[in-house]
Amino acid sequence: MREAFRKPQNWDIFRRKIVFEMKALGLDSIVIVLAISIFIGSAVVMQMLYNLDNPIYPDWVFGFASRKTIILEFSPTVISLILAGKCASRIASELGTQRITEQIDALEIMGVNTASYLIMPKIIACLFFFPVLIILSIVTALIGGAFGAMMVGTLSLFDYVEGLRLEFNVADVVYALIKTAVNAWIISSVASFRGYTMKGGSVEVGHQSTNAVVQSSIVIMIFNMIITKLFV
């Protein structure tokens, strides 16, 4: 990390690398994030309606509970695990392939700080774009919840939206974004370490890509528990 965060040697190339990584790690992940969010958001509301069917509960409670669930846990944690599977494997395999094909060695011979050139743009791209993906996930999941309510038919759209708006706290979104930023750091740094320090041949690329996904997912869940304890 100390080598990765040294001053870039060429700012023009560095900016182009960041834009490229934002597209590869961020823009290319939008479709899967939206698809998963809309179906999970719908399923969350449907499960609540099926399992909390009690006349003592006001109708707005389903929208309120869905909003809390989606903002506090589903989007920042579950979507981060999905991004770990997609982005961590890509980062580790890309850097690992460059290592075993001696591309990194060639750059170092030319005097390039390869850690800064290859790793820092990936970390910055994740830190910048993952919160955007989580905001999109939250909005899409809440819209999916409305579809779930309409499919069940026992909760009106008015009552669902009333629950979403009830006692809305901006601190919940801030909490989700802080957790997302931590998860983005974990995914990008763990995957970069696995790929950059890789030794062996092509088989090892697959092994280290798997290790990057598994280890980043485990660390995400550990820090999820720690951050939840700190903010509760």
Image (spheres, rainbow, N blue to C red):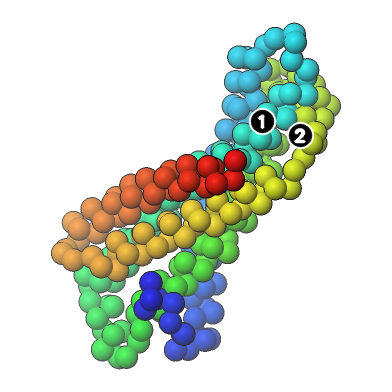
Residue 69: quarter of image: top right
Residue 208: quarter of image: bottom left
Tell me the element at label 1.
helix
Q: Which residue is mark 1?
A: 66
Q: Which residue is mark 2?
A: 164
What residue occupies the far top of the structure in this picture? 55
Of the two numbered discs 1 and 2 on the same chain, state the one appearing first in sequence: 1
Mark 1 Cα within 10 Å, few/some/many (few <14, many 20+)? many
Question: Along the horizontal axis of the image, is 58 left or right of 91?
Answer: right
Question: Along the horizontal axis of the image, is 78 left or right of 204?
Answer: right
Residue 34: quarter of image: top right
Question: Along the horizontal axis of the image, is 202 left or right of 126?
Answer: left
Give the x, y percent position of residue 46. Answer: 63, 21
Give the x, y percent position of residue 184. Answer: 49, 57
Residue found 62% across the figure and 56% down from its top: 132
Name the amino acid type tagged 2. Answer: Leu
For the C terminus, the quadrant is top right
